[in-house]
Amino acid sequence: MAIPENRRKVRSLDDLFGPAEPVKDSPPEAGGIVELELSALIPFKAHPFKLYTGERLDNMVESIRENGVIQPIVVRPIDGAKYEILAGHNRVNASRIAGLTTIKSLILEGISDHEARLIVTISNLEQRSYSDMSPSELAKSLKMQLEAAKATGKKQDLINALKSASNPHEDWDSESVVPVGPQEHSHQKVAEKNKMSPTNIKRYIRLNELIPDLMERVDEETIALRPAVYLSYLSKNEQEIVEDLISVNGFKVDMVKAEKLKALSDRDKLTSDKIFTILSGEDDKKPKKPADIKLKPKLVTKYFRSDQKPAEIEKIIEEALELYFQNRRGSENDGETD
């Protein structure tokens, strides 16, 4: 692993970034930038973002082949002489494809797990618009951001420094970039920084309670955001039943069905049969009304007087029917004893 012996360890933001100058052009002895072997790098655990594919990946690979990796990745040392990537997963992947064996790296030491999560979300969200992210990516990243921002006491210097570490291998639409701020202690704060309403922040974070198969359906847009939020309140077992029924029968889940499922689940009355009935739409089917029966005038005049009221006639018919069926049941029972 090509690490200069004279590199000094980065222990503060000033050490890392300097008071004014950007770090990307600093020599190793001045800025802590080193060449790390790609084989020594491992992805950040629970990384919420998917790696680039298709044309986007091809463009990055081509840029790195022509220009090298301009902006160093950010890592932290872990056990076993390995380094965990905090910012630059796509640059590492593209570098491997481009045939590189080492990559410029900024090593942050003494970084806690909460601080690491904050760095991961900052570096990624600063470079992506909402259209770049699947709902699952946004859900995971917002949750990480909220939890990390509540737990860490990092100063604005860290945020400013990482915001300047945008990826030079791509052009970004500044108006669509999702900004992130430090020390966020509420959904309102995170919402303001991400230019999202607090309600939508909560909705996306709630998606993390979905089982993976249902989350994938949200990514595939076969289940919309709001119905998915209602489904997230179901128990894992209930969600698995929902997923199985959707998979086998091709049922669709809309707001009405999702609300019904959640309401029954909240009351501990959501059974497998109920789930099937709701998803299939059978619970919406109204029972057929009995056919209207009209008595012929000849029958009315034969059995009823002309001065009898309809209510009286109905009562007589009801009593006659009861007597008829009682006699019929009696005859059937007598036949069974023969």
Image (cartoon, rainbow, N blue to C red):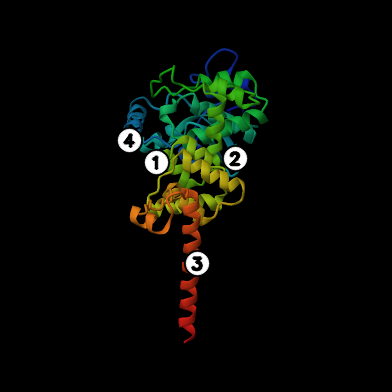
Q: CA distance from mark 4 to mark 1?
A: 23 Å
Residue at the top extreme of this rendering: 20
Q: Amino acid at mark 1?
A: Thr
Q: Earlier in the sequence, mark 3 or mark 1?
A: 1
Q: Secondary structure at mark 3?
A: helix
> Residue tagged by mark 4?
54
Q: Which mark is residue 222?
A: 1
Q: Earlier in the sequence, mark 4 or mark 1?
A: 4
Against 216, residue 129 (above or below) is above
**Who is closer to the viewer here, 63 or 243?**
243
Which label sits in the foreground, 3 or 1?
3
Q: Is residue 98 visible?
A: yes
Which label sits in the foreground, 3 or 2?
3
**Who is closer to the viewer here, 256 or 38?**
256
> Residue tagged by mark 2?
78
Q: Amino acid at mark 3?
A: Leu
Q: Earlier in the sequence, mark 4 or mark 3?
A: 4
**Who is closer to the viewer here, 250 or 43?**
250
Q: Residue at x 52, y 46 (%)?
A: 261
Q: Secondary structure at mark 1?
A: loop
> Residue tagged by mark 3?
323
Against 61, residue 313 (above or below) is below
Q: Which mark is residue 61?
A: none
Q: CA distance from mark 4 to mark 2?
A: 32 Å
Density class for disc 1 (Cα within 10 Å; few <14, some 14-19, many ≥20) is some
Q: Secondary structure at mark 4?
A: helix
